[in-house]
Image (tube, rainbow, N blue to C red):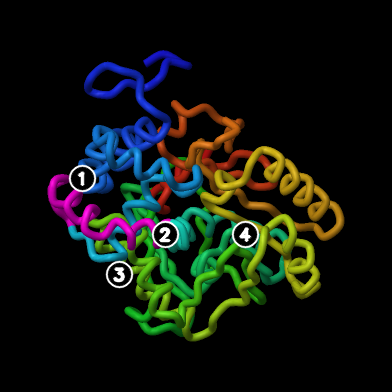
Amino acid sequence: MSAGEPARGESGTAESGTAAWYRHFGTIDAPGNSECYAEWSVGIADDPELLRRIDEWPHNKRQPLLMLAAARFLGARISPYRDFRAFLDSHWADVSRTVRSRATQTNETGRCATLLPSLAQIAAAGGRPLALIEVGASAGLNLFPDRYGYEYDAGARATRLAPAGSVPGSYPVLGCAVTGPVPLPAELPRVMWRAGIDLNPLDVRNPDDVAWLEALIWPEQDFRRERLRRAVAVAQAEPPLLVAGDLNDRLLSLVAQAPPGATLVVFHSAVMAYLDAEARDRFRATMARLAVERGCHWLSNEGHMVVLQADGSSVVPEMDDERLRGRFLLLHNGNPVAITGPHGQSLEWL
């Protein structure tokens, strides 16, 4: 398909934006990650009546992962598309209500594995412990990189890290395949303070919120579900400071609460796609100001067009789609440093 050419369904006719969105998810994003979601998404793309219902939702509520997670949250199990379609017919009112009231707040702790080398570099260079702020924090599970275990696989050798004083089995161990000159640390950095911002923070002490986090994990990926549960247990022992609101409105006030004796790092993963171009420009300007005034570091771990934008704006103009191929680009203070797996499964140092 050439650039600018509309997507076409099985009939050869041009598809609606929603149909193309689901077909892309079902043929590009889901294969290799969830065959169930791949089949369901392509089925939806070929289902005019279901597409009509989905198009009744606001644009930002039509995204495939949100709709599929809502069905999973309500009990949809791995099944052929015809059975899934029957489930939707019998639960549509509940699916619609869940989609409208929830958001894709995947709290993928695996991403800590791709952030950790940069965090350790920053801590070592500053000679001080870290103060972490995550924007788009969900339940704040990625605010505990110092409380998780890691296993970096470079092929011929592996590097393992564990939190000091913790009992094995009480924390998730995050596996990550690494290529290139990744600056793997010898020990975990010390975190003095941690906080996050989210439009609707999830509470690790709320069973419904934890169930929603589990529903956002793709059906066949039981290993992600298990490490989520262990990360939730870590966070439940010391729930993070989370504030509700727009990241552009709340960031500076939260920065003011960070201890001055720590090196401040603001980071995010798969968040910028949910902002329009103006909001992203405002955030970039704020980060530039914080770098000058507070010596703040900025780690951005984002995909390219993670969610289709109504304004057509792109998320990571620094690298083209063909290079990323469904992966994320990690930037430190605006400079690309690595290509990362979206669930933290790989780290390719540039």
Q: Which residue is drawn at 48% across and 41% down?
A: 306
Spatial separation of the CA atoms under disc 4 and disc 2: 17 Å
Residue type, label 4: Val
Q: Is 10 in front, or is 320?
A: 10
Of callouts 1 and 3, the N-terminal one: 1
Q: Are marks 2 and 1 in contact (CB under 8 Å)?
A: no
Mark yes or no: residue 339 visible.
no
Magenta stretch bounds = 78-99
Q: Which residue is drawn at 42% across and 15% down?
A: 5
Instruction: Provide the secondary structure element on which disc 2 rests.
Output: helix
> Where is mark 1, residue-wise?
35
Which image quadrant for residue 151?
A: bottom left
Q: Is residue 276 left or right of residue 288?
A: left
Picture coordinates of residue 304 (x, y %)? 51, 36
Picture coordinates of residue 38 (x, y %)? 25, 41
Please tell me whether mark 2 or mark 1 is closer to you in this view: 1
Task: Tell me the quadrant of the picture where the N terminus can be found.
Answer: top left
Picture coordinates of residue 44 (x, y %)? 27, 39
Residue type, label 1: Glu
Of callouts 4 and 2, the N-terminal one: 2
Q: Is residue 26 left or right of residue 96?
A: left
Q: Do the residues labelled 4 and 2 touch (CB within 8 Å)?
A: no
Residue 93: say if magenta.
Answer: yes
Residue 342: say if magenta.
Answer: no
Main secondary structure found in the magenta portion: helix
> Where is mark 3, residue-wise?
226
Spatial separation of the CA atoms under disc 1 and disc 3: 20 Å
> Where is mark 2, residue-wise?
110
Neighbourhood count class around disc 1 (C-alpha, 10 Å): few under 14, some 14–19, many 20 upward:
some
Instruction: Provide the secondary structure element on which disc 1 rests.
Output: helix
Please tell me whether mark 4 or mark 2 is closer to you in this view: 4
